[in-house]
Amino acid sequence: MAVSLFYSSRSIQHQEKGSSTVGNILNVKHLSKNYQNITAVRDISLAVEAGEIVGLLGPNGAGKTTTISMILGILEPSSGSIEIMGRSMAGHADAIAGDINFSAVYTQIPPNLTVLQNLKIFGLLYTVPGLAEKIEALLEEFDLQKFRNTKAGVLSSGEMSRLNLAKALINTPKLLLLDEPTASLDPSVAEDIREKIRSYAAKTGAAVVWTSHNMNEIEKMCTKVFFLSRGKILLVGDPKTLPGENGKKTLEELFIAIAREPLSTNQ
């Protein structure tokens, strides 16, 4: 797929220019992560505006989880910078932590605690004001009232996904990071989760970074996608038009082509 290298250069230049825009929730500039002789993420730049839902796509091992971990402050970058709401993670990680949250279907929630206890603990960790009222609102929003005293370990996958998302919204984050949030869910539950995330971003102006291998979901949810391969951004664009611009019929075809694209270590 020869056009990928052209788009890589043009897209990264676009993102570097855009990442200085006032009003972006997330600005990532020249971010890299090295493990001895392995480069997991190499010189990526991206920006996400308020209210925007963007997709971070790529095959397993592309660097998506490493990138998310650096944005969350779990991993320290080898080089580059991360700014959230105009503040650098390098010097304000503790202050920024209250403005971000994360959810994934594989997120571990204490199984022996009830739904109510889990939400209370996470709320206390974020020092959420008016916590009792916030919890009641989330229980209603995610249809969890009848499970308030049910231990998390006996919830169905759909119920656990709703609890995971309620937990991720407990602090009303301005940056929400979602790693495969609807994986393994039946279509009706997955659509409900997607609608709640879409509504949250629209109402609060939060920025959302979404990773998924479901290309239909990405087309529905995201206005922009970043394709990663071997730790480097190869393509950036609108998921509805990007396939045609690169000679492919669907986003899934484009995903497969990028996954198979060799990447020179000199790029």
Image: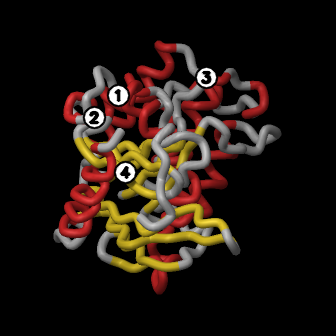
In the rendered image, residue 125, in percent from the top left (x then y), is placed at: 61, 63
Query: SS of the residue at dot 1?
Result: helix
Residue 252: quadrant of the picture? top left
| Residue at 35% from the left image edge and 28% from the top image edge | 251
Q: Earlier in the sequence, mark 3 or mark 2?
A: 3
Q: CA distance from mark 1 to mark 3?
A: 20 Å
Is 107 situated left or right of 221 in this image? right
In the rendered image, residue 10, in percent from the top left (x then y), is placed at: 22, 57
Q: CA distance from mark 3 to mark 2?
A: 23 Å
In this rendering, the answer to whether 79 lies above or below 4 is below
Numbered label tally: 4
Q: Nearer the viewer, mark 4 or mark 1?
A: 4
Residue that badge 3 annotates: 184
Q: Identify residue type, mark 4.
A: Leu
Classed neighbour count for the residue bearing mark 4: other residues with Cα under 10 Å, few (<14), some (14–19), many (≥20): many
| Residue at 38% from the left image edge and 43% from the top image edge | 55
Residue that badge 1 annotates: 251
Q: Earlier in the sequence, mark 3 or mark 4?
A: 3
Residue that badge 2 annotates: 239
- Badges 4 and 2: C-beta atoms under 8 Å apart? no
Residue that badge 4 annotates: 234
